Image (cartoon, rainbow, N blue to C red):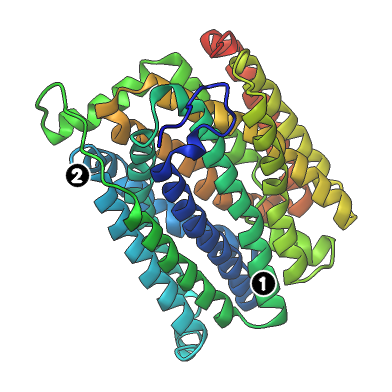
Amino acid sequence: MEYNLSTQDAYAALKIKDFMRFITARFLLTFAIQMQSVIVGWQIYQLTHDALSLGLIGMAEAIPFFCVALFAGHVADIVKRKKIILITNAVYFCCAIALFLIATSLHHALAIFGVVPIYIIIFITGLTRGFMSPAQTAFMAQLVPRELFGNASTWNSVTWQVAEITGPAAAGLLCGFFSIGLGYFFVALFTAIGMLFFSFTKNKPLPERSKTETIWQSLSAGIKFVFNNQVLLSAISLDMFAVFFGGAVCILPIFADQVLHIGAEGLGLLRAAPACGAVIMSFVQAHNPLFKNAGRNILVCVFIFGLCIITFALMRNFYAAFLMLMLSGAVDNVSVIIRATIIQLFTPDEMRGRVSSVNSIFIGSSNELGSFESGLAAKLLGLIPSIIFGGSMTLLVVAAVRKFAPELRKLKL
């Protein structure tokens, strides 16, 4: 059967069967990972009641991720990407089973070693994510024609954000009404189902490389490509520093407990709030893409993101706080889709793995190291001042990028 894959069709990418299998699998895996993130955060907070301990979750994942990220991009350009995805998915499944066992039959390990076993498992997931991330990004680009990169990025974002909503909410409900062990059981279950859908997606051959390179030449080529392209570098840097300073996800358990006085159920809803806004904005962008003035739009949206984080810190009502986080997710989604499209359009096929790895290092810095920064800032400055400080730094980052990256500011896709 033939489909009309016109770029004017908001659902064009979804009519490609392999792309549908891919984003279904990615939804299930992301759903499981988001559940696990909330459960681990709640479990460690219950065991330690310490902000820095929450921040260390991010560090436990970030350190191994950064250690392998560049090499993983090289691997994604020389090894079949579907094979990498299936192997790393299997490792995620084993980690979920380990967390389940520690929370149930092996819970005495926590009494002996404290939270160290949990950090070790998160360390392993960091290594795994380092290899999975570039393979997924590069593989997705092989599933759709070039003219649908923007449309595919939009629906990929929808998939991610729906998982961001439902995963944390499900985790909060399971922890609040049942048990942490049951939550980890469902993490393992959805990880396994996701692996099944990945296996159904057709394999794609690796793009031919234009020249033979040593591993060091290969790694440096990816780095040089990004740093020599002002649009790519500034778009990635903007996202990295904005989320590094403006992200407040890791300290939400403290905010939920000490400021809003809500339990695990409320925490799950707060974690889902940014994704709620992002899903709504993704559907808006699917029908009305914001690529015409892409550079201006990404700068404006990240600026609004910073304002939302500052306002969130001042909220004392659950619904108002939820609304601010939802708005932050909506504007952040615009920058996510534009950045993803820029990366796909500006990157040659044979370099997608390596460029994706460089991008992953930047994004990993904003997420995992941002979690550590948030936990440390909350420890040193106090909860509310630390969130306001982070939002304010985001505004300064936007001003700096606007001044020093004119090619991004003027970009039209």
- The quadrant the N terminus occupies is top left
Residue 49, numbered label: 1
| Residue 269 place in picture, x, y as percent | 74, 60
Closest to the observer, 43 or 191:
191
Q: Residue at x 68, y 69 (%)?
A: 172
10 sits to left or right of 386: left
Which residue bears the numbered disc 2?
79
Q: Is residue 128 above or below residue 312?
A: below
Sequence-wise, the earlier of marks 2 and 1 is: 1
Residue 136 at least partly seen = yes
Give the CA distance from mark 2 to mark 1. 44 Å
| Residue 378 place in picture, x, y as percent | 68, 53
| Residue 387 place in picture, x, y as percent | 73, 45
Element at label 1: loop
Q: Residue at x 50, y 21 (%)?
A: 234
Q: Is residue 96 above or below residue 364?
A: below
